Image: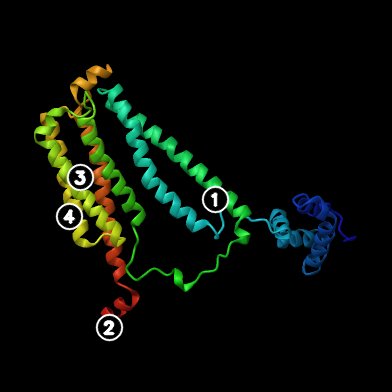
Amino acid sequence: MAALTTDLSDRYAWAVARHVPPALRADINADVRALIEAAVARQDAGDPLQAEREALIELGDPHHLAAAYTGSPQHLIGPAFYFDYIRLIKLLAAIVLPIAALAISLPLIIATPDDHLAVLAGTAWGTAMVAIQLLFWTTLVFVLLDRHASRSRDTRWRPEQLPRAGASSQRADAAFSVLAVAALIVFLVWQQLARETPFVDPELWRAWLPIILGLAVLMLVLQSLRLARGAWTTPLGILHVLADVALLATVAHAATRSSLINPAYAEQAGVPQASPWIIVTLIGAFIIGDIIGVIADLRRARASHHTPTDRAKAHS
């Protein structure tokens, strides 16, 4: 190195050493200089300055070299936890965000029933904030796990982990749906029988609420069968889509005959009466999303039945 006339090598060695523990810096500094000398010797450039530059380019970013010495990860979430992280994010988004949107929108509907844009904007903004918090805290937990637990975790894949052909487990989503539909049924009955002033317009009990409760019970049965089987079957999926359509049609027709929200409740709460079509729109958005999810699950299940062997036989 005596032939070199620039301070590039000194700066490179220092850049590597500053990212390692102090106790290792002297040894790593000497090792890095030896690497630079060997890299310079391999260069064909006649100019010593050019040879030094090419040698440092060959060694690469000093941050990467320092990480190689210390064994520190160069990723946010590594392969040990990556797929668990993605699965949990999807599950939490499917469960938490719809609940958050409903919880945010209902007070806005009651407070500002005539300002549809404010309801939509407030719901969107609030749900987006929940999504950001959900993503941040979940990512932080997995980053900490990856830094402190990935080295002790056995990440080797085993054949026992293979899913059964055509099996696409949807039990977590089905369990949530069972709980959600059961909670809806309990709420509708409770608010009518246990409250002096029901939240839902009592006039709906003459025709529409019994139909809505019947459809909800049918959905509860279908989701329970889905939970037991682990995935939708074609008959169950079709029945659930028809129940979704019937529920939306029933609510929409009820909105032409009723305000949906009990006028006495709105008066008691001291808020203006909300337009029933805002409620229909929100319920419709959830139902349409549910229909799309059922259809997507059925298509994935159908595609998974066509294994590469089956496709090869069909082709031949």
| Residue at 30% from the left image edge and 48% from the top image edge | 177
| Residue at 78% from the left image edge and 70% from the top image edge | 42
Q: What percent of the width, then of the height, locates residue 211?
A: 13, 41
From the viewer's perspective, tell me whether residue 139 is left or right of residue 231.
right
- As measured in the structure, the alpha-carbon distance from the residue carrying label 4 to the one carrying label 3 is 12 Å
Name which residue type carries label 2: Ser
Tag 1 and tag 3, C-beta contact below 8 Å: no
Which SS class for mark 4?
helix
Closer to the observer: label 2 or label 3?
3
Which SS class for mark 2?
loop
- As measured in the structure, the alpha-carbon distance from the residue carrying label 1 to the one carrying label 3 is 37 Å
- As measured in the structure, the alpha-carbon distance from the residue carrying label 2 to the one carrying label 3 is 47 Å
Dot 2 corresponds to which residue? 316
Dot 3 corresponds to which residue? 216
In which quadrant of the rendered image does the C terminus lie?
bottom left
Could you say which is closer to the camera, residue 259 or residue 30? Answer: 259
Name which residue type carries label 4: Leu
Dot 1 corresponds to which residue? 142
First reached walking from the N terminus: tag 1 or tag 3? 1
- As measured in the structure, the alpha-carbon distance from the residue carrying label 2 to the one carrying label 1 is 47 Å
From the viewer's perspective, tell me whether residue 7 is left or right of residue 245.
right
Closer to the observer: label 2 or label 1?
1
Residue 69 vertical position relative to residue 102 in the rendered view, above or below: below
| Residue at 22% from the left image edge and 23% from the top image edge | 196
Disc number for residue 239: 4
